[in-house]
Amino acid sequence: MSIRRLIGIMAALRTPGSGCPWDLAQTSRSIAPYAIEEAYEVVDAIERGDADDLKDELGDLLLQVVFHARLAEEAGNFAFMDVAEAICTKMVRRHPHVFATATADGPDAVAARWSEIKAAEKAEREARRVGACEPASLLDGVPLALPALTRAVKLQEKAGKVGFDWPSAMEVMEKLREETREVEEELARERGGAPSQALVEEIGDLLFVVANLARKTGVDPEQALRAANAKFERRFHHIEAALAAAGRAPQQASLEEMEALWVEAKVKEKGLAAP
């Protein structure tokens, strides 16, 4: 079975004396960034519709799971099969409409029940805590390692479940305008050099509200920003190609020339006739 072979390969890589020096030097903390990177590459393959790349990237992500499980096994905590059993148990428990006698009237009902079961699981974990120094927070469980935009949305979702939320996207827009004004005020105070801490905080507040606006409108901010990044790349590549055809580089063009080519790329993308 391929999964057992993969587990065996990882064990060989981690065997002192005969294994790989790089793999032997790693810890869960040192390889943690790779799990995030590989997850992003999976999403990228999905968005590009590349099935071959998706197969490869899913394998790379699976390797990260196997690697972390091996490190945990060496520490006497758990092994890969424990990870697999834990997720099997969780999936069965969270799908009583499939594996038990509950019924579900569509995806929304399934999502609501999932949230209820997840909340009950969290309550059980909190009840098992012994000697906790601080009371549990509603915001517990949102990983610090998440991309900042994604984490902002998850924090907002948790707060929103107890009513700490704007009722509508239009009210978020008003807050967005307020935060923009505050950024402008701080910019007016800047005197060059490194940005002030006040400016850093105001721009952070602005980004947090943008994430909230995305959430209130049902937009995934990470996905929206990735799409905006791709759009920027396409249009800048058009600028580079147009200048290269004239024997020039972007460094040799004025801002006005590049902006005109940007508009040209935008018009071409939208399939409109140039004015």
Image (spheres, rainbow, N blue to C red):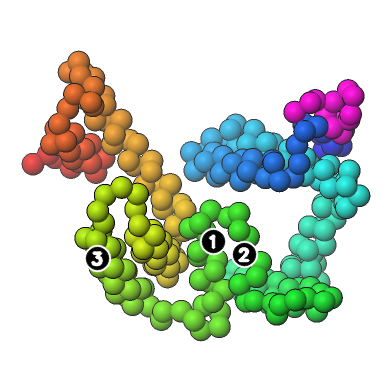
Q: Are marks 3 and 1 in contact (CB under 8 Å)?
A: no
Q: Position of residue 126 (x, y in %)?
A: 77, 76
Q: Name the amino acid, label 2.
A: Val
The image quarter in which residue 23 lies: top right
- The residue wearing badge 1 is 151
| Residue drawn where x is 78% and y is 57% of the image | 87
- The residue wearing badge 3 is 185
Q: Name the amino acid, label 3.
A: Glu
Determine which of the numbered discs, if any, sits on residue 142 in the image. Answer: 2
Q: Position of residue 78 (x, y in %)?
A: 87, 51
| Residue drawn where x is 33% and y is 73% of the image | 175
In the image, 197 versus 96, the foreground residue is 197
Task: Characterize the local packing of mark 1: few (<14), some (14-19) or many (20 or more) Cα atoms within 10 angstroms.
Answer: some
Q: Which residues are magenta?
A: 11-22
Q: Are marks 3 and 2 in contact (CB under 8 Å)?
A: no
Image quarter (top left, top right, bottom left or bottom right) of the N terminus: top right
